[in-house]
Amino acid sequence: MRQESLYRLFGGSPGRVLLRLVFISFVVGIILSAINLQPLELIYWARDVVLRIWDMGFEAIERVGSYFLMGAIIVFPLWVLSRFLKLGRGEQ
């Protein structure tokens, strides 16, 4: 893969992006530790939310899906447009 392609894929230098992700992960880890929240608790919470929605029936799943689609109609085109505008300006 060419270097330009890697820059475009990562949104910058892969090394800088990796360092930024490491730093942000460290900060988020400190914040989660400060509020006494463990990663497994987040996974269990997400699982419980899915199970509650499942227990409410397929109508709730349909409702959640429609909310997702309504949001996606706005969010995804804006995201694609922003990526095209960034590429058009030559920014990574």
Image (cartoon, grey):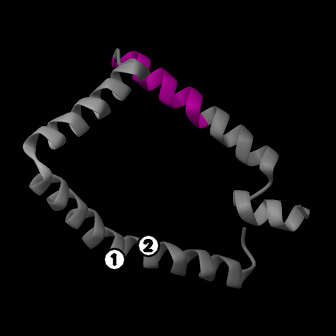
Residue at 35%, 70% in the rendered image? 72
Task: Pick out the residue farthest to the front.
Answer: 58
Q: Position of residue 85 (x, y in %)?
A: 61, 82
Mark 1 touches mark 2? (CB < 8 Å) = yes
**Quarter the N terminus occupies:** bottom right
Helix, strand or loop for disc 1: helix
Residue drawn 15% across the image and 36% down it: 52
Q: Nearer the viewer, residue 44 or 79?
A: 44
Q: Which residue is mark 1?
A: 73
| x then y, percent, for residue 41 | 34, 20
| Residue under the image location 71 percent in, 57 percent down | 10
Give the crowd class for mark 2: few <14, some 14-19, many >=20 residues within 10 Å: few
The picture places residue 51, in percent across and down from the top left corner, at 21, 35
Amino acid type, callout 2:
Phe
Residue type at mark 1?
A: Ile
Q: Which mark is residue 64?
A: none
Quick one: quadrant of the C terminus?
bottom right
Q: Which residues are magenta?
A: 24-35
For mark 2, give the secondary structure.
helix
Q: Looking at the rendering, which quadrant does residue 65 occupy?
A: bottom left
Q: Residue at x 17, y 60 (%)?
A: 62
Does the magenta portion include 85? no
* Residue under numbered circle 2: 76
**Magenta region, main secondary structure:** helix
Work out whether 46 lies above or below 63.
Answer: above
